[in-house]
Image (spheres, grey):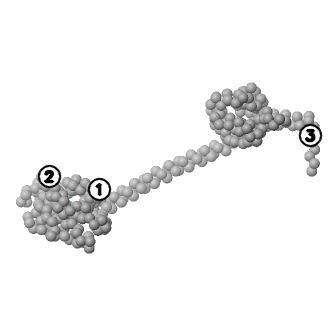
Amino acid sequence: MKQVPFHPEELDLFFKQLWKKSLNPFWICKPIADDFEMILANPAALALDPRQKPGTKFSELVASGKYPDGILDGYHKCLADKMPLEFEQTPVINGKEYLFRTFLVPIVDAEDKVTHIWGTSHNLTDFIDPQRELLMINQYLDAKVQERTAQLNDAMRRLEKLTITDELTQLANRRYFDDALKREIGRAKRNNQPLALIYFDIDYFKTFNDTYGHTAGDKCLRRVAQVLSRHAQRAADVVARYGGEEFVMLLPNLTCKQALQVAERVRTAVTDLAIPNADTVAGIVTISAGVAVIKESSASADTLLKLADNALYQSKSKGRNCSLIAD
Ligand SMILES: Nc1nc2c(ncn2[C@@H]2O[C@H](COP(=O)(O)OP(=O)(O)OP(=O)(O)O)[C@@H](O)[C@H]2O)c(=O)[nH]1
């Protein structure tokens, strides 16, 4: 279908009305040196920002701090490429941040020179508010999930600790020790290194309980446990409450002689506590120890425990308050 040409007067009428009545801002500017100068802005543009009046330099608009620095880049690109261009900009007008999708069209003269740039914008601000709200809700939910995950991890860590900790002494419990023993035996064999185990047992603890009561007995167990903890300082050392008044210490890569020295240091430190145990030979709380060290590659956890237990039995038989190595 052939297009009916407009009369120039009609065209003038159309454009004048479009210019005047459009709700979209329109403006025409021209390049001046490194800047752009506003030639004309329609009522919608002026209603949005009255500073866009004719004669205003774009650098002045940017200098007001209300327009993003990059806004001029779009105009320079349009000028250089002589091609229509669209980009988004977020000016702050009267304290409110807007989002505009801006379209620029270069007006080129007969000598292929850009004389003017025609611009228009679509105001997309109404779309970003719900988006922002959604983003804030998302951020809030993310933070909540992170907080709950941290709480859950914390609870799991506490639960995990509870399952491997002796409640009275806060040392590792037998369950943890049994696992550690298996693990360390495997490591000692693989690395061809010694692994020492010391079995400790408080002497005449029944007498202590009978004399001072169960609560004092608990307190005594806690104090002895602290002494043991202090003497198992390397990261791989494990000290555990093995049962009632029995404790074990696992010392990777320690020779028999070195382990005996540790046992003796613990024994002496317990006597240094000088906790009275009146109805006994020593008159104070003492401890006996049995030391065993893994030697052959065939040695198992049971063998090591049995050896240390035998050595402890010998310490008890020899009168207690001493440390002996398993034969
Ligand atoms: N207070 C208290 N006593 C405990 C606990 N667990 C075990 N005992 C007591 O530890 C005592 C162990 O007594 P025995 O096995 O006869 O050993 P002992 O009196 O230390 O004698 P020897 O080991 O031969 O020197 C018992 O009286 C138990 O009741 C505890 O958690 N708290």
**Mark 1 — residue?**
235
Residue 119 drawn above or below residue 157 = above
Q: Quadrant of ligand 1?
A: bottom left
User: Whole-percent x and y of residue 2?
Assistant: 93, 48
Asked whether 317 or 299 is in front, the reply is: 299
In the image: residue 60, left or right of residue 139:
right
Which comes sooner in the sequence, label 2 or label 1? 1
Amino acid type at mark 2 = Leu
User: Whole-percent x and y of residue 265?
Assistant: 16, 56
Give the CA distance from mark 2 to mark 1. Answer: 25 Å
Which of the two discs, 3 and 1, sits closer to the camera? 1
In the image: residue 168, left or right of residue 314:
right
Give the CA distance from mark 3 to mark 2. Answer: 111 Å
Residue extending furthest toward the left: 281
Amino acid type at mark 1 = Ala
**Mark 2 — residue?**
273
Residue 246 drawn above or below residue 272 = below
**Mark 3 — residue?**
6
Residue extending furthest toward the bottom: 298
In the image: residue 155, left or right of residue 168:
right
Q: Secondary structure at mark 3?
A: loop
Q: Quadrant of the C terminus?
A: bottom left
Q: Is residue 92 visible?
A: no
